[in-house]
Image: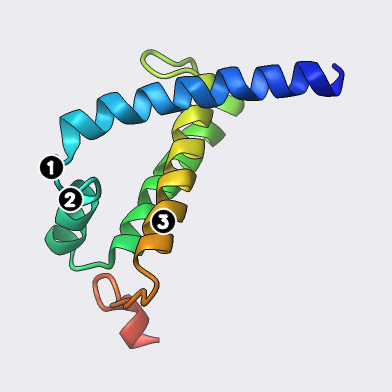
Amino acid sequence: MNSKELLQSFKAITDKMCGIIEKKNNDYAKNDDAFSNFKFCADFSGCSVEQVFSNFLAVKFARLKELLNGKQARNESIEDTLIDLANYCVLYKIYRDENIQNQQKPCNNREAET
């Protein structure tokens, strides 16, 4: 693969990622707050929004591990999981850029116990 082919593949993947984000954001978040679903999860769990992102990423990495170890997918393929991971990373980056102060509180007080 040469550089031009790489960039074409990259663009095709990021276009797909953008389409998925557009659909999921419509389904999960309020129109006036693209991160409202993550904030709800944080409030519900007693965690910071950043910890919610970390948890979502961890779930996707756990799924990827299972698929790479030979588990047969019934719903999401390895490709779907990789796209989800990339989307969560980009969303997390955007959230961090918008919320510089990053006030974190421990989830389930585990960090407070250590």
Res. 27 image quadrant: top left
Q: Please name the amino acid that badge 2 sits on.
A: Ser
| Helix, strand or loop under label 2 | helix
> Which residue is under mark 1?
30
Q: Please name the amino acid that badge 3 sits on.
A: Ser
Residue 69 lies, in percent from the top left, at 60, 28
Q: Earlier in the sequence, mark 3 or mark 1?
A: 1
Q: Earlier in the sequence, mark 3 or mark 2?
A: 2
Visual colour scheme: rainbow
C-alpha span from label 3 to label 1: 21 Å
Residues under numbered marks 2 and 1 in contact, where contact means CB atoms less than 8 Å apart: yes
> Would residue 40 appear left or right of 47 to someone viewing this image?
left
Q: Residue at x 47, y 20 (%)?
A: 16
Residue 96 lies, in percent from the top left, at 41, 62
> Which residue is under mark 3?
54
Q: Quadrant of the C terminus?
A: bottom left
| Helix, strand or loop under label 1 | loop
**Res. 80 visible in picture:** no
Q: Quadrant of the N terminus?
A: top right
Residue 53 lies, in percent from the top left, at 37, 53
Q: Is residue 112 above or below residue 60?
A: below
Q: Nearer the viewer, residue 65 or 98?
A: 98
Residue 48 lies, in percent from the top left, at 28, 67
> Would residue 86 appear left or right of 44 to someone viewing this image?
right
> Which residue is under mark 2?
36
Q: Nearer the viewer, residue 23 or 4?
A: 4
Q: Nearer the viewer, residue 84 or 31?
A: 31
